[in-house]
Amino acid sequence: MISLTSPVRTRAHGWPAGAKLLALCLATLVLFLIENPVLHLAVLALVLLAYRLPGPVFFRAGMSRLWILWPFVVVVLIWHMLTDEPVTGMVIVLRMVSVVGLANLVTMTTRLTEMTDLIHRLLAPLRRLGLRTDALELAMALVIRATPALLDKGHNLRDAWRARTHRRPSWRIVLPFTLLAIDDAEHLAEALRARGAITNERE
Amino acid sequence: MEKNIAYIALFAALIAVLGLIPKITLAFGVPITAQSLGVMLCGTVLGAKRGALAVLLFLGLVAIGLPLLAGGRGGLGVFASPTVGFLIGFPVAAFVTGWITENWRRAPVGIAAGVAAVIGGIVVLYAFGIVGMSVVMGKTLSEAAMLVTAFIPGDLLKAGIAGMLTSSLVKARPGSVLSRS
């Protein structure tokens, strides 16, 4: 399955995922403490520069992901214009775009395998306490595999609907779709049991 | 154990796929999709614990960078955007929906599931969503509430659909509606 990691290789792709996440948490915290609009403007300029450095392809991909914020930006700006607090409105908008922009940067420069490795390492203390984390890791892999498979079956259902009527598929199509998911789950459970995937005394 | 893992994984995938089917976007850019219907179904079909776990699994995969949210969104950025409250509320909504479906045995399953979806998937979910919006957008709670009221009619519709679907699922696959078996 395609993840949101950018195919454009940047220098940040080589940085450890844990360090990037920690830096993101700290930066977000600091941005929520700053109230100075000029400082926020400088931060946003730096964030945009970071998007621009790897080249125009990376920049465009990043901007299109930030674009979904525009309705919120418009609402906040109009609101604070009406309440005569344009500076507060600017701070809120700048902070929102910077924080989301930084978080997206981490996602765009970190491969899925590095993220799953990081999760595996973060779960180590739980394993030492005797908790089994392999079930969680198995479940994550199963969802990654099942989502495109289920999407395919959804497309087949839609085609079957279209072959029978010219009307658009209504919510009724969700019932056979959910049944497909349930039947898949039953088959999957059987296959896992047969392979002894999870040998657990807690059964 | 295997059955629980398989159901949790498949319902996490179901939430994702329901978010990918065609949608209508209303005001404020929050796309109206069947994704929250998926969260309601996790509760009404899987019950409180398994339903919440399926939603958490889904959110975990979104956080590590899979584009599974409605409109192909995902990554860490969505947890900083104004709609973050709804994401945090998703697992709680599934838990409450599941708990009510499990415990309100006197009502027919369709009614119980429908009412549970209204309480969990709308009342609880919007409480989280409104708090999140007020924090990120710097608005008071009542101001934030005004911004989301437009989506309540659509979600009421989805809760009704969740109830009807659950009662049909009980007839089609009685052993698979884990909240009632």
Image (tube, rainbow, N blue to C red):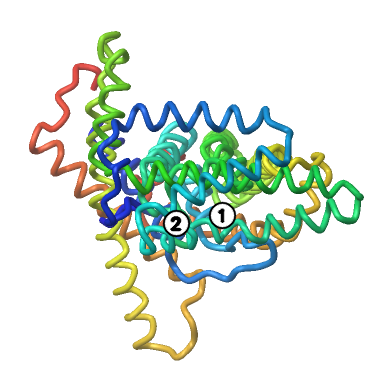
Q: Residues within 10 Å of mark 2 (few under 14, many from 20)?
A: some
- Mark 1 sits on what residue? B163
Q: Amino acid at mark 2?
A: Gly
Residue A4 screen position, x and y as percent = 35, 53
Identity of the residue drawn at 39% across and 59% down:
B17
Identity of the residue drawn at 27% across and 44% down:
A111
Q: Are marks 2 and 1 on the same chain?
A: no
Chain hosting mark 2: A
Residue B143 screen position, x and y as percent = 82, 47
Which quarter of the rendered picture does the C terminus of chain A lie within? top left
Vertical placement of residue A53 versus B123, above or below: below
Q: Is residue B123 left or right of residue B113?
A: right
Query: Viewer-proximal residue, B81 or A185?
Result: B81
Residue B92 screen position, x and y as percent = 56, 35
- Mark 2 sits on what residue? A62
Q: How many marks?
A: 2
Which quarter of the rendered picture does the N terminus of chain A lie within? bottom left
Would you say residue B129 is visible in this rendering?
A: yes
Q: Amino acid at mark 1?
A: Gly
Question: Which secondary structure lies at badge 2?
Answer: helix
Would you say residue B112 is visible in this rendering?
A: no
Vertical placement of residue B80 versus A76, above or below: above
